[in-house]
Amino acid sequence: MKASKLLRMAGAAALAVAPFVTASLLAGPAEAQAKKIKIGFVTTLSGPNAAYGKDMKNSFELALDHMGRKMNGIPVEVFYEDDEQKPEVGKQKTEKLLQRDRVDFVTGYIWSNVLLASYKPVVDSKTFLISANAGPSQLAGPQCNPYFFAASWQNDQNPMGVGELLNQKNVKNLYIVAPNYAAGQDMANGVKSTFKGKVVGQDMTKWPDQLDFSAEISKIRAAKPDAVYVFYPSRWGVQFLTQYSQAGLKKEIPLYSVFTIDAVTLKLQKDLALDTYFGLFWAPDLPYAANTRFVSDYKKKYKDTPTFYGAQSYDAANLIASAVAATKGNLKDKDGLRKALEAAKFDSVRGPMKFGPNHFPIHAIYQQEVYKVSDNEYDIRTINKIVDNLQDPHAKDCKMH
Amino acid sequence: MILLLVEQFLNGLQTGLLLFLLAAGLTLVFGIMDLVNLAHGSLYMMGAYFAAVFTQWTGNFFLGALLALPAGALLGIVTEVIALRTLYTRDHLDQVLATFGLILFFNELARLVFGVGGMAIELPAWLEGQVEVLPGLPYPTFRFLIIVVGLACAFFLYYLVQRTRLGMLIRAGASNREMVGALGIDIKLLFTLVFGLGSGLAALAGLMSGPITTVQIGMGDNILILALVVIVIGGIGSIRGAFIAAVMIGIIDTMGRAFLPDILGSFLSPADAGTLAQALSSMLIYILMAGVLVLRPAGLFPAPGR
Amino acid sequence: MKPTAMIPVSKLPFKSPVTTITGLVLLGLLALVPLASEVFDDPFLLTLFTRIVIMALAAVSLNFILGYGGMVSFGHAAYIGIGGYAIGILAHHGIREAWIQWPVALIMSALAALIIGLLSLRTRGIFFIMITLALAQLVYYLGNGAYAYGGDDGLTILERTDFGGIIDVNDRITLYYLCWTLLALALYLCYRVINSRFGMVLQGAKSNDRRMATLGYPVFRYRLTAFVIAGAVCGLAGVLTATQADFVSPAMMHWTRSGDLIVMVVLGGMGSLFGPLFGAVSYLMLEEILSGWTEYWKIVFGPILLLVVIFARGGIDGALARGAAGYLIAGAAALFLIYGVHSAYEDAWLVPVLILVAACIPVALLWRRRRRSLHGGGDHA
């Protein structure tokens, strides 16, 4: 009786200790090998948008394969973390990468709001943060930072290209619909900054909960614009296109978009994406050697077509590698790394690009379209270049120090 | 302007009726078994996935739907027999937690089985078009079909609950469960039947919303909270209450989204007006619910004897 | 409608020495985390446990009304948000002094609790759960619509609270001990209140409010007071969350956050002093471990939740009191073993194992029902 009680007490004590033992063992080998380049990669790997996280991860892995999983002869280790598309989770995972895994670079980030929440701890710890997708205006302007780079674009850039396209197509009245979060606002402002006609209506929908756009589509019909411009990434793009077509508007009002049609959504959008207009800095058929190699090897390895999310991740890996090579693997040389990153001496899949003073790319935007490859297969191709050497408008607000 | 108003009213009605389809099953199960089934949203999702798979398989939306309905009901019955039966005697808190666990499970299961990319349900061409509801007012045929199905379902449930023997038992069960059992009714069978009916309704809601919003993992999570709001406003166990509350919420939400941004936009920037308008139209729903509960603590149409 | 609470009334804060000792040992060990973080050279350990201690504080406040008062508030995260936003908004306007920030945050969350309590405490059962949810959603959408403070995207806090040089919350260890001290204080406060006359009335009202009212106690007023205290303490957790994260967003008061808090309390054991502590630590550790395994971690986590509800009534605390510490250890050990084996391999093998584990659960449930019917019922295992 007594013994059993004692045992029970001991058991209880052991139970109380258990989490600590677990936690400390979780810590694992913190710095087993010093000579290693550690990269943290935060993206969305669960939930309805996991397909994009997977595409980014695949592309980053492909880039590593292409460089023999070594940068300047030093082996590379990548830590992939899932942000669940939630700002606070992304921030927690970022802190984990910085404090436990002690990564030398942090990259990834699909969502602008996740990036904005995670950004401070990274740059505060003087670690280089290279966004492989999100490019919020805040980080391009007043909050720009010596430790932040975008391997993708600034949110306003692609819409600015579409604004020019609208001018070229002689559109006078435009209706804008976009989700209401950091990126959605930038995407709406971007198109307005270059579009010369009149914006007859603008709706900002609830993000990410709103999936039914019936009220907005009815308003578009009543407003009778010359064209509609939307930004609905991933699944929302499928939903918007479906509902737009069901309402019969696709035949009546031309649809312009950014980041709404990609290789993943196209599998569901199919015919709905035909005969719409969109502009982007990259397409799978851009005739550059780096791009051809990326796209064909991706198709070979993963039996799938990469999206722009993947292209940017591929670029991010090569950008990091170029900086590591320039400093001969001396990761302590932060100034040297920064100068090398700023120089952007790597073969981007988008062709020629350079960084502006705010560490955001200056590059071209292309008009693209969807075409039918075969009965059930669709792809994206380039039509022409809309603008060259486009810089975002926030660079002037950036005081890098 | 009048036409736009009518169109937005139809949009609100359609949203509300879709919500009603989901809430009806929830309120039946809650009313008669006193079970808070958060996994109802998962049955809605699975119904949509079944419809997508069967539609792909048979090549016809109606055949797919016809197969998805019994599949959804069957999945519900299996879930009831395996996991939920033990929960009837527990308090609501336990039920909420356990069924919350089921939501997580179903979401990941769907990801493993159907993949991450989501699925589209393809409609026959005539459903992809529009019907002229009023002169000069074309309305998407499929959304119109949702309104028709929603209303038909409401009448069917009204008839079932008010005019049939099963309905009598359902009403009796909502008022006093023990007494029904004491009168010699096979309560286990009744529960399983009602649960199957509720799951079938959830699957119907799922397969009707699938062609509009596409089929995705977690599609039932957010709409479930709205459905709970509906049944609480309507009074638990009351089909009539659920119908009125669902239509009310659908119309409030749509009208808020449709007209608030323009009203606010006259003195705010579009982004600010959008932010505020969404917050306000979402808040209206919860203000309605809090108001109803403060005035009538058991909802609009509480089942007698509770 | 049946009462929401089904737990036997005769629950004193210290119902079994085993749980008390476990709780105190755990609290003591938590005080050693900064040391462990130094020894293992793992700063993330401190970050993780700061978050755990803060969530435990919020769980303690919820347990006070849920466990002892029987009030199932499904909107408790609203106070975390209010406390956090009070700090965020004041800091946004350049007011960093602690003697302004903290009182404002506490008063705002207490005030919100007063209003929510006044409106909701008239209802019972599921209606109480839903009205607290509705009111918390109102607060959530308020944060959502506050476009001047970032709306949905949230607000970054550029500089932390200034304590006039007495406490430096920029120092990670200082911040941790601040959180730990507040948690210990909250536990002590809870212990004292529960054993006071006030606490007795509260618990009495939980089991039978009509009887208490007949005895002449103003039950509504007692409940409201408890509700406000809990709101203020939870607001404090919000203050600490905002300080630690340097960031506030409406997501911190999303309804799923309120759900997390309820799960922690129930998992740990409702109406037990140390229950919320057990719950918060095990819930967040489990999340950390499982999500480190695989993105599919919720397929394991969901059924675990279901199993705890069905088998382990009274949560971890109840299991300890019944002398089931051994099972819990076995469970933790098994989990850890799998983790260890797993870390040696790639993710790929895990998926079939997970499906297998998941498939075992219905079998276990069926087996249990069969066994119970053989032994002639009796719900308590």
Image (cartoon, grey):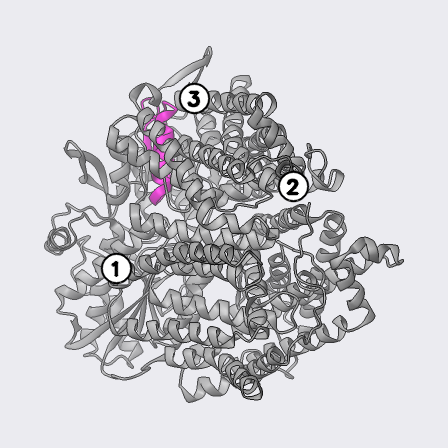
Asked if residue B113 is positioned above or below residue B284 in the image, the reply reads below
Residue found at the very far top of the displayed protein:
B135
Q: Amino acid at mark 2?
A: Glu
The answer for how far apart the CA atoms under marks 2 and 1 are is 57 Å
Left or right of C13? Residue C38 is left
Residue topped by disc 1: A57
Q: Amino acid at mark 1?
A: Lys
Q: Amino acid at mark 3?
A: Leu
Asked if residue C273 is positioned above or below residue A157 in the image, the reply reads below
Circle 3 sits in a helix, a strand or a loop, which is it? helix
Q: How packed is label 2: few (under 14 Cα within 10 Å), some, or many (20 or more)?
A: few
Chain on which label 3 sits: B
Q: How packed is label 3: few (under 14 Cα within 10 Å), some, or many (20 or more)?
A: some
Q: Residue B65 or A329: which is nearer the viewer?
A: B65
Query: Which disc, if any, is residue B145?
Result: 3
Asked if residue A376 is positioned above or below residue C1 in the image, the reply reads above
The answer for how far apart the CA atoms under marks 2 and 3 are is 40 Å
2 vs 3, front mark: 2
Residue found at the very far right of the displayed protein:
C216
Asked if residue A145 is positioned above or below residue A296 in the image, the reply reads below
Q: Position of residue A166 (x, y in %)?
A: 32, 34
Residue topped by disc 2: B178
Circle 1 sits in a helix, a strand or a loop, which is it? helix
Residue shown at 85%/55% (left/top)?
C213
Residue shown at 43%/77% (left/top)?
C44
Residues in magenta? A227-255
